Image (cartoon, rainbow, N blue to C red):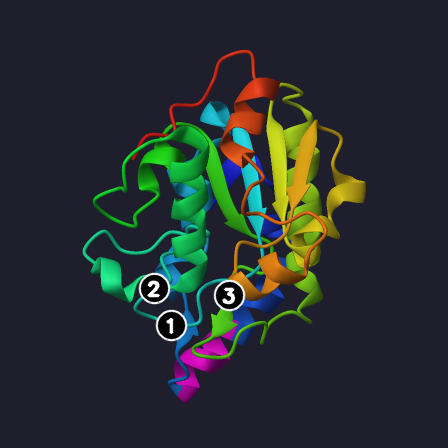
Amino acid sequence: MKLWNLKYWETGEYQVIQEHLDDYTKAKTMICPQRKDIFKALRETPYESLRVAIFGQDPYPNPAHATGLAFSVPAELRRSDWPPTLNNVVKEYMDDLHYPEPATGSLLPWAHRGVLLWNVIPTCIAFRSLSHQEWPEYHELNKEMLERIADKPEVVCVFLGGIARAYIPFCKNDYLAYSHPSPRANLSSKTPFLGSRMFTNVNDKLKETIDWRL
């Protein structure tokens, strides 16, 4: 595995993560997303095509929702089953850009246009949010990712939520920071996601704008 050409894949930290995951597999403990999708965001948005990096918190704890792309859900998931966080993302998308409601909750088109959708805590135990918050091995991965992103100064970073904002000191690129899109975080934040016009603000910082239409 050489995603983004990171040294992390050859480190002891990555090996520790794999050992943790092996233990879960042996114990038949379900994690989110599926193991094969943990680093899906890095596969779907190769470093060479990276234009925007959005950092979220951790995966949706419901296995039916988690895809390996932050905030995204499977394309076949019914609108009525979308998690509240995605509802807020879509609400801001519609309010900011005046686009109609998307047909699905899959954000894969953004990933394919150079928008990294990454959770700084890439895994959790099913139905237990933040259960892997204390895994320091992910911290090293996030820091190296931001070092790589710094080699592309044109890339804009977006940090959503306090856990993601903790990585701002490691960011050398232009960035934006708002609350996590979840309803609870949005209500309690001084920089709420709803009404932020995040999509327009990102495009204002880019020489070539992102086509956000889903």
In the rendered view, would you say 29 is above or below 21? below
SS class of the residue under badge 1? loop
Look at the numbered discs 2 and 1 and tell me whether their residues touch, using CB distance below 8 Å. Answer: yes
Q: Which residue is mark 1?
A: 62
Please report whichever mark, 1 or 3, sits nearer to the chain's N-terminal start: 1
Distance from Cα at disc 2 to Cα at disc 1: 5 Å
Image coordinates of residue 82 in percent, x first then y, are 32, 61
Q: Which residue is mark 3?
A: 123
Image coordinates of residue 172 in percent, x first then y, are 76, 30
Name the outermost residue toward the bottom.
27
SS class of the residue under badge 2? loop
**204 vs 53, nearest the viewer:** 204
Q: Residue at x 73, y 48 (%)?
A: 167
The answer to whether residue 2 of the structure is visible from this angle is: no
Disc 3 vs disc 2: which is toward the camera?
Answer: 2
In the rendered view, would you say 186 is above or below 1? below
Q: Residues within 10 Å of mark 1 (few under 14, many from 20)?
A: some
Image coordinates of residue 46 in percent, x first then y, are 45, 32
Amino acid type, residue under disc 1 in the picture: Asn
The magenta stretch spans which residues? 21-27
